[in-house]
Structure formats: C-alpha cells, structure tokens
Image (cartoon, grey):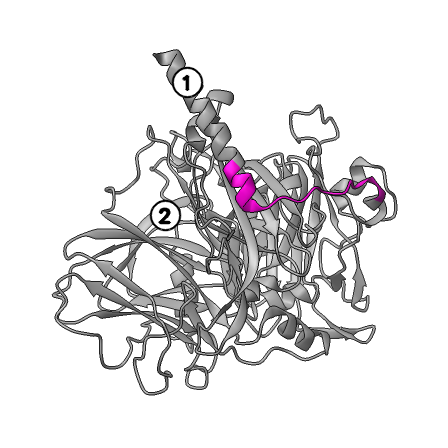
C-alpha cells in the first residue's frame, strides 16, 4: 500500500481540543527516494509522502504539533524546523547536538508547541547534505482569530520553494567536498521542485515548469523560501510589485520592491496585486546573485504567472533586477530597509514594538568570524573563530542528562583567536541564562553567507562592510529593527544582532550554506538555568532515541508503516467523534 498522500489527520484539531488547553494537530510524514527529472535529467530526490517538495505543515499560534516521521531512506535522518523556536524544548530541534538520528526504517514523533509564533518557515533534513536532494517543505503558522492581520485578508495564497539545484544527488555532492574540492556551479534553480520555463533556446525541451493561476484585480499572499544549497537568489515577478509584509515570524513595515534578494535559509511573505492588463503571461524569476551572472545564466529558475484572462504566453527576455551587485551598497541598502511594523500585533495582541530591545543593557559580546575553507589534518574544513565543529556521537543535551563526561568542551572562543592554528573539535559556547547579548557575524569568506540560530529570533540592528569595531554600536537601529532567525552577511562585511538568552537548552548556531555547514561551520550555545525547576526547560521526552555512549539504552523499535498508523489514528478519531456525537444527542 503506498504511503498516504495527505499529511493532516482529518478532525485532529477537534481531537486535540478535547484533550489539551491548546489545540493539537498531527501529521505523518514518510521520507523516501523517488525518481524525478526537474532539470530534464532523471535523478534520485527525497520526497515527503511521495511529494517533492514536501507538503505544508499548517498550524495556528500556540498549537501543539506532532509530526511522526518515518525514515525510508538508506541512511540516518533528522528533520529540523527552520525558525520554529521550540520554547523550552531543544529536544525536538532535529539536529545532531540534541537528537540521535532516526535509523533507516525507523520512525520518530516530533512533538512541539508553536508558542507565540506566526509566519512563514520551512522544514528540511539536517544530516549528511540531504537537503540538496529535497526532503523540505513549508511551514505556515496562522494568526489566532482574535489578532487581526496588519493588511486586508488576501484573496489567495501561494508558496514558492526556490533554490539552486544539482543533477547529482547529495551523496555525490558530499563526496566532492570529502575529496577536498569545492562544489562546481549548480545546474539550475528549481521553483517548487520544477525547472525553468522555456524562455529561450538554452532551456531544453520537455522540462516541467511551475505555473500559478490568478484572477485579475485580486491580491495574493506569496511566501518564498530559499531552500537551496548555497546560492543567494533574486526573486521577481515581471511587471508586478512585491509588497513585503512578513519575514520569519515578524510583520514588517510595508515596502514595495520590484525584485528582492533572498539568501539561503531565509523566508519572506509578499502581497502581490494582479493589476496588469494580461496582454500575455508573466515570468516568475529566481536567479543567482553575487556571482558572474553571465557565466551563471543557467542558474535561473523561471515559472509563469497566468491570468485567467491572459491573451497569450510569456515571451521575450527575462526582467532584470534593478539592484546591481556591482554596487554592493545598493544591495545592502535593500536589506537595511527591512523594518519591523512596530504598531501591528504579531503572535500576541500587544504591538510588536512594545518590546523595547534597544533600551536593554548589553551584557555580553560574541564575534563569530568565518574564513574560506582550509586544510586541517589533511581534510578540507570550514571554521568559525578557527574551530571546525565535529559533532559528537552522543548528543550534548542527552549527555548532560545522563551525566556522560568528555562528550564536548565548553571552550569555544567568544572572539577570533589569531594566535592559534585552525582546529577540529566539539567546542561549544557556555552562555549565561537571561543575559542580553550582541552577536557579530564577521564574514571574511569570499561568498555571501546566511547565519541561523535555532531556538531564537534576534534583532538585526546593523550591517556594514569592513571589520566591526566597538564604536559601531552607535550606528545600531534601536527602535524598529526586524527580528528574525536567519540573516545574510556579505563577503568582507559584518552583521550585528541583539538577542535575549531566555530560551533554555542547547541550540545550534550555523551557517545555512550547506557546503560550509557540512565542512564544520557551526557550533552550539548551551543555555542552562542554574535554578532549573522544570519550568524553564522541558525534560527528556519519553520517546527519545539513544545513540553513541548511550546506545545500550535503546530498545528495538517495532516497525509499522505510515499507512497503518494513519488508518489506526483515523479509527481512533472516528470512535471519539461517535462518542462525542452520542453525548450531544
């Protein structure tokens, strides 16, 4: 029996409402290999419930979410939830520092609350370069009904999962990196798992492209996620304005753009009004940025926006971005223009601007410097502050709970140390609970990098070219900086963020560019409340998986299929509804 094509249990919301203070919603996801040809070349991709990209996880603020993940791959798997803060619950984060991998043919149920969050996010496999083969999908967290949107309700909604793509799968790509080489130019850009529309003769025949059908005069919300390997992309819709309204869980001041740079791991929402005359269809374009764009012309994704009254197909050259990467100030200014909508409500009724982050005293500084990859102990490695992270075989939080010693060291340098040669190690940051810190991401590499911190949103208060110095604090935006979880750092530049360390746990800090991440450009922040009483951090979940030094504690799993599990839950829910109906009658 094939895996179920739908992910949400019918009536799961009703079932959750009867058992918990906050509503609950459940999904069953089966990750497996399928054959697809997004760029015209048959290849193995990772599908979720047979779909590439995967289905959407939809919830509402404060919902409890369960996702039962079945691993049908031939290697271990973890899913991580980019931008979901997992309040008090790093056990569900889906990265090696906090979770043992799901072995092949096993399943694991993630259980977390989307506490005080709204907005656009995505999930993806966090191990072994697997995201380069798929396994990703969108996450949408809706406002509660009592909290209005800061804009008129759109007439519809679309999601675009964009990203650079290789016709070789993740196992081949990581073998290239393991051999000490850098990855070559990608083979293209996908939009929702599909290749480019044949806009000129360079595009082969027979490639399936994405088409979005719209009605004239209507306004649609579009959510765009860069889920690619390592390429920043410029997104645009021919002849249409993109009104920016949200990024990674915060409503923004509403600004129109003709095109917009979306870096690896970032998510945005725009409103787009269908106000053109529909003389033809219109191009949807996602093209490579901060590269030689003539050489990288093939690294372009093209879809079609089709009005219901369109008079013909799209034709002619693609629209070009108005922002010119040869003038980096103009490119950076676009990102600087992203401000928080301080008057609108977010996940809570109070205005987003009611948290006066700029008035809080900074009690700690971390400077994380990235450099080009280098050879350490005969292997190509990427570093932060001269340390290339090596994930221990026992997850760090699990080691803490079971008092396993020697798994990691809390000696990660808070600033670059030029006097020491680069090294490989399981070094993490021992941070102080509830401190308010500034973090400086200093990019001395040659490519744009996106930095992400699990478990948190941070305020992006400044960015500039050159090296950060203490006197640059005077340039910080202390009023309406956007709060988000993934921020770009341009080569030869820095980005400063402010963050309150109020979410206890062990949290991954990483570069989202897969090649650098795979080569070790990450660490963890350990934030433990010394007076922990069960209120600031949840305990180890009952279904925890064991590995490494604790593998002897792992019981053998009784395997069941996703289909049989789904059927069993439907029977349970149906029985519950019958009892409920009988009590009403």
**Judging from the image, what secondary structure is the residue with disc 1 in?**
helix
Residues at circles 1 and 2 in contact by the CB criterion of under 8 Å? no
Label 2: how many Cα within 10 Å (few below 14, some 14–19, many 20+):
many
Left/right placement of residue 171 relative to residue 285 reads: right
Q: Position of residue 75 (x, y in %)?
A: 68, 60
Q: Is residue 561 covered in magenta?
A: yes
Q: Which residue is mark 1?
A: 580
Q: Is residue 325 left or right of residue 412?
A: left
10 Å crowding of disc 1: few (<14), some (14-19), many (20+):
few
Q: Residue furthest right?
A: 405
Outermost residue on the front side: it is: 1
| 43 over 335 or under it: above or below | below
Mark 1 vs mark 2: in front: 1
Whether residue 20 is situated above or below residue 485 in the rendered picture: above
Residue drawn at point x = 60 percent, y = 65 percent: 514
Q: CA distance from mark 1 to mark 2?
A: 43 Å
Q: Position of residue 8 (x, y in %)?
A: 44, 41
Question: Residue 93: which quarter of the image?
Answer: top right
- Say whether residue 154 is visible: yes
Region in magenta:
552-567
């Amino acid at each position: 029996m094939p895996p179920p094509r739908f992910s949400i249990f019918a009536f799961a919301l009703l079932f959750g409402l009867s058992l918990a203070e906050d509503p609950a919603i459940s999904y069953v996801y089966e990750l497996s290999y399928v054959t697809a040809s997004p760029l015209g070349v048959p290849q193995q991709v990772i599908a979720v419930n047979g779909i590439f990209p995967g289905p959407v996880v939809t919830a509402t603020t404060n919902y409890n979410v369960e996702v039962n993940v079945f691993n049908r791959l031939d290697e271990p798997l973890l899913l991580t939830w980019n931008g979901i803060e997992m309040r008090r619950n790093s056990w569900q984060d889906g990265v090696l520092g906090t979770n043992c991998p799901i072995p092949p043919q096993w399943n694991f149920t993630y259980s977390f609350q989307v506490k005080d969050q709204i907005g656009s996010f995505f999930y993806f496999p966090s191990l072994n370069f697997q995201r380069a083969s798929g396994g990703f999908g969108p996450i949408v967290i809706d406002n509660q009904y009592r909290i209005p949107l800061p804009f008129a309700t759109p007439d519809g909604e679309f999601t675009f999962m964009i990203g650079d793509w290789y016709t070789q799968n993740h196992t081949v790509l990581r073998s290239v990196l393991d051999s000490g080489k850098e990855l070559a130019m990608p083979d293209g850009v996908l939009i929702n798992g599909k290749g480019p529309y044949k806009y000129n003769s360079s595009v082969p025949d027979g490639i399936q492209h994405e088409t979005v059908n719209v009605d004239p005069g209507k306004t649609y919300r579009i959510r765009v996620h860069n889920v690619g390997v390592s390429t920043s992309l410029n997104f645009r819709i021919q002849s249409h304005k993109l009104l920016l309204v949200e990024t990674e869980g915060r409503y923004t001041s509403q600004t129109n753009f003709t095109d917009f740079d979306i870096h690896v791991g970032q998510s945005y929402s725009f409103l787009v009004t269908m106000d053109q005359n529909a003389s033809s269809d219109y191009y949807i374009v996602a093209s490579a940025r901060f590269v030689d764009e003539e050489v990288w012309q093939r690294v372009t994704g093209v879809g079609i926006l089709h009005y219901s009254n369109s008079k013909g197909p799209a034709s002619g050259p693609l629209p070009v971005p108005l922002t010119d990467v040869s003038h980096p100030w103009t490119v950076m200014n676009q990102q600087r223009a992203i401000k928080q909508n301080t008057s609108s409500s977010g996940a809570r009724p109070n205005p987003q601007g009611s948290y006066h982050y700029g008035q809080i005293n900074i009690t700690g500084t971390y400077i994380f410097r990235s450099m080009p990859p280098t050879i350490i102990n005969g292997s190509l490695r990427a570093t932060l502050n001269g340390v290339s992270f090596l994930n221990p075989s026992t997850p760090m939080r699990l080691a803490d709970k079971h008092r396993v010693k020697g798994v990691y060291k809390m000696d990660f340098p808070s600033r670059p140390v030029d006097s020491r040669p680069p090294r490989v190690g399981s070094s993490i940051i021992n941070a102080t609970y509830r401190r308010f810190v500034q973090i400086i991401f200093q990019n001395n590499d040659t490519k744009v990098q996106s930095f992400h911190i699990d478990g948190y949103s941070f305020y992006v208060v400044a960015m500039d070219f050159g090296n950060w110095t203490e006197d640059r604090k005077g340039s910080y935006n202390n009023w309406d900086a956007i709060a988000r979880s993934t921020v770009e750092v341009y080569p030869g530049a820095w980005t400063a963020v402010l963050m309150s360390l109020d979410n206890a746990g062990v949290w991954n800090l990483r570069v989202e560019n897969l090649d650098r991440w795979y080569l070790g450009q990450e660490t963890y922040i350990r934030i433990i409340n010394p007076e922990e009483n069960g209120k600031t951090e949840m305990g180890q979940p009952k279904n925890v998986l064991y590995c490494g030094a604790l593998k002897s504690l792992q019981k053998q799993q009784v395997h069941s299929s996703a289909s049989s599990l789904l059927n069993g839950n439907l029977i349970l829910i149906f029985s519950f509804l019958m009892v409920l109906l009988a009590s009403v009658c």
